[in-house]
């Protein structure tokens, strides 16, 4: 199997380094020809996103009414205030096009929300292509790398759930994946091109202007770029590339965060008051150590294990703990009223059937979860190689970047959960908030499966077989039951 060449990171070799940026559709190809299994996965994955975008009621979702009110206010030509929407602290980029459609087309909030849902399909397609472009940059002709990466992303129900909602996270997913790609392109070429550095700045800026989680991308990318340039003996060019990226990012998104600070006194403004200081004691012991058993595998739904971090996050990743996607509602003949949209019925008609199924989904998804954990640990090993070696290869550099992006995102998310606790429910524990990290995990899974094939083809086949088996069982959890 062919491998991308990785030139040593030394000052004398910079001019000789040859790492070409993959074309938009190159990721779907092997040896210059479209690879049918990859194309089929990409089509199936985005067809599900399209189905949900068309069928899911735009007035149903996490804080749906506030997101639609954000669009309505923005359509009037001004930034959102707390009196307009509980999402006043959210950056405006995801709402601009629906608001424009509302203003120019005279749409009602639900119809403008449907525009937002359909735009999510384009965001998903873009995410798919950028995941494959990262893989193409690592090893252009490694089939299992690409199949594993895209296959893992395709089996996670929270991806489809989030892309059916009207909110900012789908935008963060696209721009975070694009930022990871352009950062990988820059660190793969220690003498980076102006174009790649600028594109990186645009991606980071748009991610930050989509949701505050996008700001968590900046520190690991800056650290990786700086360390790569230092190891290459090209610190000056690295500083220039980093300065361009950060400058473009600040130009795109900085104005909004200055506005938050000016209006509310902090760039981390939120719709509930924080604790006086950050302290792990802000959350009870059950938040950190709660297992959710036995309900985790029998009835992983709302109120089963309130404010327990890992069980809720796991159940939201593979199922629908909060009940906004696979539960149906009693008022099937009427549209949900906008002022009641964000709180689905606690006793939906299909609860007795769907709750045990979600328990089975959690159980069946254990092997795929362990595969993801193993892939992240492989990323830790790669990061160790990156720190120890003066001339790490492209795969090591990219895996290290992805690991640092994961660490930064989850540390930032934990900070948020500890500073803004909800002791009764834990309603801010949502895998949707961290969805932008799943493409990073997916690429690490692809790298792990590719490496397994070099050591034990049988083990690779067994590990890769987890993905389609999980997909087939979990497919009903990827389809909305909240329909207009």
Image (cartoon, helix red, strand yellow):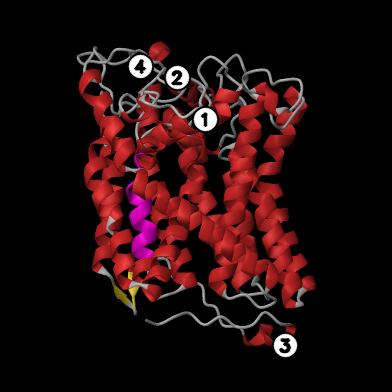
Q: Is residue 267 left or right of residue 207?
A: right
Instruction: Give me the C-alpha separation between circle 3 and circle 2.
Output: 58 Å
Q: Which residue is mark 3?
A: 12
Residue that mark 2 sits on: 65
Q: Please say if 437 is above or below 37.
A: above
Residue at (55, 63) in percent of width and height: 399
Residue 201: assigned label: none
Q: Which residue is mark 4?
A: 344
Q: Position of residue 435 (x, y in %)?
A: 47, 42
Residue 144 lies left or right of residue 379; in this view the side is left
Task: Say which residue appears at 44% left-offset and 80% top-offset.
Answer: 3
Category of crowding for the residue at label 4, using alpha-carbon neighbours closer than 10 angstroms: few (below 14), some (14–19), many (at least 20): many
Instruction: Give the mark, 3 or 2, whose residue is nearer the N terminus.
Output: 3
Relative to 99, say whether 447 is above or below: below
> Which SS class for mark 3?
helix
- Label 1 belongs to which residue? 309
């Amino acid at each position: 199997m062919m491998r991308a060449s990785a030139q040593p990171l030394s000052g004398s070799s910079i001019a000789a380094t040859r790492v070409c940026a993959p074309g938009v559709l190159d990721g779907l190809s092997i040896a210059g020809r479209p690879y049918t299994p990859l194309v089929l996965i990409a089509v199936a994955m985005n067809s599900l996103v399209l189905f949900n975008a068309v069928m899911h009621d735009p007035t149903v979702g996490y804080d749906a009414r506030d997101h639609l009110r954000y669009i309505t206010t923005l359509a009037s030509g001004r930034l959102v205030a707390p009196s307009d929407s509980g999402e006043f602290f959210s950056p405006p980029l995801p709402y601009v096009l629906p608001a424009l459609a509302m203003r120019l087309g005279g749409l009602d909030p639900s119809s403008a929300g449907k525009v937002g849902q359909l735009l999510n399909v384009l965001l998903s397609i873009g995410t798919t292509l950028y995941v494959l472009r990262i893989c193409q940059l690592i090893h252009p002709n490694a089939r299992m790398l690409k199949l594993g990466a895209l296959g893992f992303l395709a089996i996670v129900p929270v991806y489809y759930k989030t892309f059916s909602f009207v909110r900012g996270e789908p935008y963060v997913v696209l721009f975070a994946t694009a930022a990871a790609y352009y950062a990988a392109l820059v660190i793969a070429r220690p003498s980076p091109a102006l174009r790649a550095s600028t594109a990186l700045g645009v991606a980071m800026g748009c991610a930050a202007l989509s949701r505050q989680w996008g700001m968590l991308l900046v520190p690991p990318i800056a650290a990786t770029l700086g360390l790569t340039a230092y190891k290459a003996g090209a610190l000056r060019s690295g500083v220039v590339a980093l300065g361009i990226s950060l400058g473009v990012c600040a130009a795109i998104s900085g104005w909004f965060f200055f506005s938050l600070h000016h209006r509310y006194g902090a760039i981390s403004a939120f719709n509930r008051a924080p604790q006086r200081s950050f302290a792990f004691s802000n959350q009870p012991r059950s938040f950190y150590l709660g297992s959710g058993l036995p309900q985790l595998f029998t009835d992983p739904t709302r109120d089963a294990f309130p404010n327990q971090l890992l069980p809720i996050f796991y159940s939201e990743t593979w199922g629908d703990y909060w009940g906004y996607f696979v539960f149906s509602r009693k008022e099937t003949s009427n549209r949900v009223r906008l002022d009641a949209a964000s709180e689905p019925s606690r006793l939906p008609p299909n609860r007795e059937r769907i709750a045990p199924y979600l328990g089975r989904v959690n159980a069946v998804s254990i092997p795929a979860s362990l595969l993801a954990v193993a892939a992240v640990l492989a990323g830790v090993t790669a990061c160790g190689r990156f720190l120890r070696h003066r001339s790490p290869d492209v795969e090591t550099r990219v895996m290290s970047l992805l690991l640092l992006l994961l660490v930064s995102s989850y540390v930032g998310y934990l900070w948020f959960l500890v500073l803004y606790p909800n002791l009764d429910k834990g309603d801010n524990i949502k895998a949707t908030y961290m969805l932008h990290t799943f493409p990073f995990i997916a690429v690490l899974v692809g790298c792990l499966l590719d490496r397994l094939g070099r050591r034990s083809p049988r083990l690779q086949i067994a590990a890769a077989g987890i993905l389609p088996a999980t997909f087939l069982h979990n497919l009903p959890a990827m389809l909305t039951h909240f329909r207009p």
